[in-house]
Image: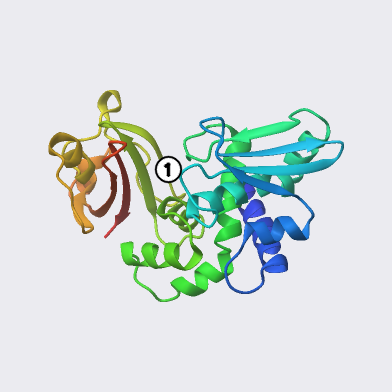
Amino acid sequence: MLRKREVELSELAESIANYYCPEGLVDPAVIAKKIDIPYSYGDYGDAFDGLIEQENGSFHIFINNRNNFADHPRSRFTFAHELGHYFIDEHRQALLKGKTPSHPSFTNFSSKNPVELEADHFAASLLLPESRVKNDCFKKRFNFKLISDLSSKYQTSVTATVLKLMTIDKHPIMLVCSESGRVKWFKYSHDFPFKWLKKPQGVVPRNTLAGAYFSSKEKFDDELPITANDWFENVWDRDISRQFFEKCIYSDRHNFVLSIIWEN
């Protein structure tokens, strides 16, 4: 997504957050009620995470909370994502014109569909309004505790929180999602110094915290130093020992690791 479009969507989402939820936590359900969009929570299996449906100019949002409560960070993000399809003018017009009378979404951050990427960005910006987040970050050192504190305050997942931080130039960050020893997707802030992972045939590099988990199930509770040459491809000789931090979030059930990487 172009930087200009990111800014536009961020400003749109923040204006909506400030208008409908000017203080405290941004609640997607409150916003939906105020704009007269009914919604339903339910167990919809694997059909979708969220769905916005349009019929005769009226909208309805469905939230799949099969494993979560309504106020769970994932459910909140899914709800905000579906609101994005309504508030983003191009998305709403497509629904109204019948191009997509119902729009199922999967909020797993791996989509390459521009429409889904825009709704994801809107959702993160709605739940984490930029000016509020910047105020919370003011003069604070960037580390995982800052991410964790923001995630707790705004009731958002670590992934959504980092994705928002990527767009406000707080600190250059990269996110790498790995599953069963292979890189599933990765994203980085515009100012992150390296753009390519060292991943022959998609395999997670061994000399990383994520690599240690997949090779021996070793876990690390803390953020630990790594070098540019551990994760990244096309590193100049002068940058081989350039130091970064890696912090991992693990899921044994899904054989999954989320790596947050930032420069020391």
Q: Which residue is mark 1?
A: 187
For badge 1, the amino acid type reads: Lys
Q: Position of residue 259 (x, y in %)?
A: 31, 47
Location of residue 97 by image quarter:
top right
Q: Is residue 263 left or right of residue 70?
A: left
Q: Decide: is 180 above or below 107.
A: above
| Residue 143 visible in rendering | no
Q: Residue at x 77, y 35 (%)?
A: 95
Q: Position of residue 123 (x, y in %)?
A: 59, 51
Q: Quadrant of the C terminus?
A: bottom left
Q: Position of residue 156 (x, y in %)?
A: 48, 57
Q: Residue at x 76, y 41 (%)?
A: 92
Q: Residue furthest top?
A: 201
Q: Quadrant of the N terminus?
A: top right
Q: Is residue 253 left or right of residue 225?
A: right
| Residue 14 visible in rendering | yes
Q: Residue at x 36, y 48 (%)?
A: 193
How packed mark 1 is, by other alpha carbons closer than 10 Å (few <14, some 14-19, many 20 or more), is some
Secondary element at image label 1: strand
Q: Is residue 179 left or right of residue 164?
A: left
Residue toward you, 147 or 154: 154
Q: Residue furthest front?
A: 43
Q: Decide: is 194 above or below 34.
A: above
Q: Residue furthest right?
A: 56
Q: Residue at x 35, y 40 (%)?
A: 177
Q: Position of residue 179 (x, y in %)?
A: 31, 34
Residue toward you, 227 or 165: 165
